[in-house]
Amino acid sequence: MADKEFILQGFTTRTHADAVRELFDIDSIERVILSVAFVSESGVQQLEAKIAPHIANTTVFAGIRNDITSHQGLAALLALANDLFVVDTGSRQVLFHPKLYFVRGSERARLVIGSANLTLGGLNNNIEAGMLLDFDLLDAADQATVAAIEAELDKLAADYAANVLKVGAVSDIDILLATGRIVDEMAVPPPRPGSSSSSTGGNADAIPRIKLKVNPLRRAIKKADAAKPKSAKAPKQDATVVAAAPAPMPVPKAAGVQYEIVWESKPLTLRDLNIPDGANTNKTGSINLDKGLLPADVDHRHYFREEIFNQLDWSGANAKTTEEAYAKFHLVIKGISYGEFDLRIGHTIGTESKAYKQNNAMTRLSWGPVKTHVGNPDLKDRTLSLYRDLADPTRFVLEID
């Protein structure tokens, strides 16, 4: 009979990432099968070192048409799987949702099954439940169960040929992206607040962030390119003009406004939130836009002024040392929208100052009208994410969570 272990990630220190890695600690691995609803690049990165030696024996089923599975995630899996299938149910009302991780050796097989997807949240950060089962293939009952698991999964591609699609090249993944069935992790919809708040500030949402027993992991943020001028609308055609034959139109990557994430902070401090943390500490009214979680090769001293806010109208607050600009920022805190605000960005000019040579932040965001919303001690140690509108580079989203 199979040995069993219950995993309650988050409320215990046991993570699904650790449990899945342990699946590979058996002799003579002959088969690896992964089946998940959602895939992200950072999720695949948690397991790639364990899967890589067994590429020839690895099969993956991944759900698509769900607004989560990404081009980057599938591309990473393609390099690790001999057989990669995407499951497209043809409807947003029906999801491919089984989550299991299976490894079979010559004498033992192991299975993790439960709620954990192949994402950073599923494998580490979320509260997830699952079971780890260890099968003895010398036991007839265990052997029958393992055979049934493989048989059911192996017939999916033949039984549902129109919906279980083999991915053989990156070009196949490109088509899935162009037809809107997967997402680009660098071009994301804005945060979708569950509700909006009419509060004018203060501690309107006093629910603290739940304290879990697993340290959260953060995905790496990739450098954004300099913004291009705001997209211009095409002029209307005269109704009397005969229209040319329509060209095939690709389905957009995702419905609605598209944003790209351009920066994430390290855990927020009280100073970031404009909260004095000592008798000799003054409120600054702003947050430094520093290195945060940017890649090591990105120079934050230039990044914000030259790449992120380069399409704003800058003026010289003090022409010799500083300049300033204003932009629209939609504020979302803990999944609740507080509306859109005009916020000031300040930038220190020059490369000879002591602060510049010490790699300090040269760009600052003034909290201004949102300081009462962000001045909440409960937001300490959370993350501030900055998103930029892909169509209008003068509009942004600030999300604290």
Image (cartoon, grey):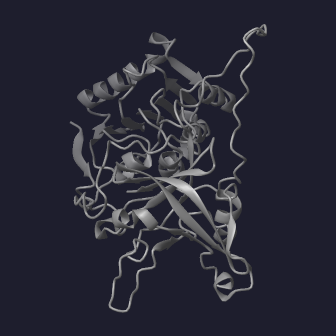
Q: Position of residue 103 (x, y in %)?
A: 41, 38
Up/down of 309 relative to 393, above or below: below
Quadrant holding the C terminus = bottom left
Image side of residue 124 versus residue 172, left or right: left
Q: Residue furthest bottom?
A: 280
Up/down of 161 relative to 367, above or below: above
Tell me, yes or no, if residue 346 can be seen here: yes
Q: Position of residue 349 (x, y in %)?
A: 71, 76
Q: Position of residue 67 (x, y in %)?
A: 47, 33
| Residue at 51% across, 12% down | 161
Quarter of the figure with residue 314: bottom right
Tell me, yes or no, if residue 22 can be seen here: no
| Residue at 27% across, 31% down | 142
Residue 386 versus residue 141: which sits nearer the camera?
A: 386
Image side of residue 129 versus residue 396, left or right: left
Quadrant holding the N terminus = top left
Up/down of 359 relative to 175, above or below: below
Number of marks present in the image shown: 0
Residue 27 versus residue 37: which sits nearer the camera?
A: 37
Image side of residue 330 versus residue 296, left or right: left
